[in-house]
Image (cartoon, rainbow, N blue to C red):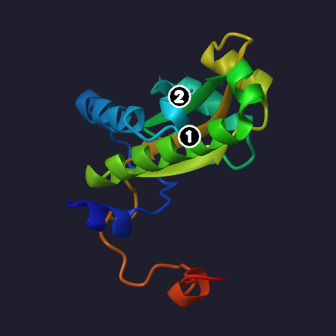
C-alpha cells in the first residue's frame, strides 16, 4: 500500500481476528514509531510491547475506553520518564502523538488494524507493565487484524467537510 492509500485506509479497529502478528511486522511498526519526528530530536518515548493474553486483559483495565486492548494481538504502551513529562508536558504529548500516528500508519500499510486509548490509572499501568515509579504510561495503541473487513481506502470517511476544517491565509 502506498502512503496516501494507508492514510485513507486507516480507521480505528477495535475488534480483532484471533491471529498473531509476526514479530518482523511488529518490529517494522515499532521502527516507524522510533523514527517519528520529535521536538528538538528529544525522543522521550519508550515502547513496551505486550502480546501475552492475560497481560493484555489486565492492561485493558487502565482506562474505561481501553476494552479493545484485551482482544488485540499486541498492544504498545507509550511510556515517558516522569521528569520529562513534568518538564515539558506539551512536547511529550506532541511527540507521543506523532509516534502514535507513525505506528498506526505503518500497521495500516501491513493490513493491521489499530486503535489508541489513553491511560487513566497510572498505578495499575505501572504494575501491569513493570514500570519504574519514575515512568508513566500515557497512551496505548492496540494492534490486530480486523475481524470485520480488511483495511482499504475509505471512499466516504466520517470526517468534517474539507471546507469546515481548512482555512486559507486567515480563519
User: Where residue 78 sits in the image (x, y, percent)?
Assistant: 57, 32
Q: Nearer the viewer, mark 1 or mark 2?
A: 2
How many labels, in total?
A: 2
In depth, the one of 72 and 2 nearer the eye is 2
Q: Earlier in the sequence, mark 1 or mark 2?
A: 2
Residue found at the far front of this picture: 169
Measured in 3D between alpha carbons, the distance from the residue under mark 1 to the one under mark 2, in whole angstroms, is: 9 Å
Q: Nearer the viewer, residue 88 or 105?
A: 88
Which of 160 and 98 lies nearest the eye of the viewer? 98
Q: Quadrant of the N terminus?
A: bottom left
Q: Are marks 1 and 2 in contact (CB under 8 Å)?
A: yes
Element assignment for label 1:
helix
Can you say whether 165 is above or below 29 in the image?
below
Tag 2 secondary structure: loop
Query: For residue 69, what is the image quadrant?
Result: top right
Q: Position of residue 158 (x, y in %)?
A: 53, 79
111 vs 84: above or below: below
Name the quarter where the C terminus is drawn. Answer: bottom right
Q: Which residue is mark 2?
A: 42
At 70% from the left and 50% from the top, the residue drawn is 65
Residue 35 in the image: above or below residue 150: above
Q: Which mark is residue 95?
A: 1
Task: Say which mark, if any, is on residue 60.
Answer: none
Choose top left, top right, bottom left or bottom right for residue 31.
top left
Crowd tier of the residue under label 1, counting other residues whose Cα lies within 10 Å: few below 14, some 14–19, many 20 or above: many
Residue farthest along the left direction in this orientation: 1
Q: Is residue 4 left or right of residue 159?
A: left
Considering every residue shown, the one lying at the far top of the view is 132
Amino acid at each position: 500500500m502506498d502512503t496516501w492509500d494507508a492514510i485513507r485506509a486507516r480507521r480505528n479497529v477495535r475488534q480483532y481476528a484471533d491471529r498473531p502478528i509476526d514479530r518482523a511486522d511488529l518490529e517494522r511498526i515499532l521502527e516507524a514509531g522510533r523514527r517519528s519526528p520529535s521536538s528538538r530530536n528529544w525522543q522521550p518515548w519508550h515502547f513496551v510491547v505486550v502480546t501475552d493474553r492475560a497481560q493484555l486483559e489486565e492492561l485493558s483495565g487502565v482506562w474505561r475506553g481501553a476494552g479493545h486492548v484485551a482482544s488485540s494481538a499486541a498492544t504498545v504502551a507509550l511510556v515517558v520518564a516522569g521528569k520529562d513529562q513534568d518538564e515539558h508536558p506539551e512536547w511529550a504529548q506532541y511527540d507521543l502523538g506523532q509516534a502514535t500516528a507513525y505506528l498506526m500508519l505503518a500497521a495500516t500499510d501491513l493490513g493491521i488494524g489499530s486503535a489508541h486509548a489513553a491511560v487513566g490509572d497510572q498505578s495499575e499501568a505501572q504494575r501491569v507493565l513493570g514500570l519504574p515509579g519514575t515512568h508513566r504510561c500515557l497512551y496505548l495503541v492496540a494492534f490486530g487484524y480486523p475481524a470485520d473487513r480488511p483495511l482499504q481506502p475509505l471512499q466516504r470517511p466520517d470526517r468534517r467537510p474539507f471546507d469546515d476544517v481548512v482555512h486559507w491565509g486567515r480563519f
